[in-house]
């Protein structure tokens, strides 16, 4: 279970400060597919990055499986992060490593024997239809293939939670479907997933709950039917008119 308690995040710069999150309180149950939608700048990416403390909140607490992550030492936090996979807009693959060695990388860092890491990586690449790309390098892949490799690399650590920060926003439209298909299969496996997305169809069809953010706050949340078919707030109604 993920619990966010009175979460706040302020970014400061020479030109002033921006309050990206404002007293966010949220509980995400194990096995939920939790979609986060909203306009650019609403605080969606900041929120999901606070869950594994890639962004450290200015105030409040983040609890995952009964542990207060905001109170952990850096060493203890690193251990917890192994159970929280993260997929970004950009693929963050290691260009000098082959696809197979990219997937092996986190396993090697965690001390998994090389033969075991290789076997696990090969099995996962088969699952997402990329076994024939094992010896290829990232520069030889399409955007959709790169994102599938990034997902497999995160799955190699057998995480309990997967966080997605707009995983399809950097892809050409024809490549979006192949990544969403992998994510849909993950959802069916019972994996807890938190997905910041502009793909309303995915949030509506796959999500168990959807949250609409506006100006750093939770403006509305509920089942996909609640949010998409019966929006309550004028802000959400206006947003859906523009994106659906």
Image (tube, helix red, strand yellow):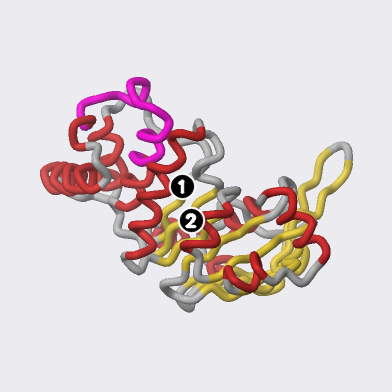
Q: Which mark is residue 20?
A: none
Check disc 1 and report its element: helix, strand or loop.
strand
User: On the image, numbered disc 1 is attached to which residue?
Assistant: 87
- Residue 187 position, x and y percent, is 39, 62
164 magenta-colored? no
Please, is residue 56 above or below residue 118 in the view? below
Would you say residue 67 is visible in this rendering? Answer: no
Relative to 178, 216 lies left or right: right
Please, is residue 235 above or below residue 226 in the view? above
- Residue 156 position, x and y percent, is 28, 51
Q: Nearer the viewer, residue 143 or 154?
A: 143
- Residue 135 position, x and y percent, is 20, 27
Q: How many marks?
A: 2
Q: What range is drawn magenta here?
A: 134-149
Q: Which mark is residue 163?
A: 2
| Residue lying at 25% horizontally and 34% vertically, measured from the top left | 101
Would you say residue 167 is visible in this rendering? Answer: yes
In terms of image quadrants, where is residue 150? top left
Check disc 2 and report its element: helix, strand or loop.
strand
- Labels 2 and 1: the sequence-earlier one: 1
Q: Measure the alpha-carbon separation of dots 2 and 1.
A: 6 Å
Q: Answer whether labels 2 and 1 touch (C-beta < 8 Å).
A: yes
| Residue lying at 30% horizontally and 59% vertically, measured from the top left | 158
């Amino acid at each position: 279970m993920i619990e966010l308690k009175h979460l706040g995040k302020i970014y400061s710069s020479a030109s002033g400060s921006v309050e990206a999150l404002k007293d966010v309180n949220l509980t995400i149950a194990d096995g939920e597919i939790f979609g986060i939608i909203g306009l650019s700048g609403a605080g969606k990416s900041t929120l999901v990055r606070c869950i594994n403390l890639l962004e450290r909140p200015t105030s409040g607490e983040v609890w995952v499986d009964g542990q207060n992550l905001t109170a952990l030492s850096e060493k203890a936090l690193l251990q917890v992060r192994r159970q929280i996979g993260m997929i970004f807009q950009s693929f963050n693959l290691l260009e000098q490593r082959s696809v197979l060695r990219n997937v092996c990388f986190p396993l090697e860092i965690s001390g998994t024997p090389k033969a075991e890491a290789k076997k696990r990586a090969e099995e996962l690449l088969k699952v997402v239809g990329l076994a024939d790309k094992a010896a290829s390098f990232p520069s030889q892949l399409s955007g959709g293939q790169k994102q599938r490799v990034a997902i497999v690399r995160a799955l190699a650590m057998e995480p309990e939670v997967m966080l997605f920060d707009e995983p399809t926003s950097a892809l050409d439209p024809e490549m979006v479907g192949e990544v969403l298909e992998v994510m849909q299969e993950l959802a069916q496996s019972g994996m807890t997933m938190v997905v910041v997305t502009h793909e309303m169809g995915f949030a509506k069809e796959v999500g168990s709950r959807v949250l609409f953010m506006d100006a750093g706050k939770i403006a509305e949340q509920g089942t996909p039917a609640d949010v998409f078919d019966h929006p309550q707030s004028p802000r959400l109604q206006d947003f859906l008119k523009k994106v659906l």
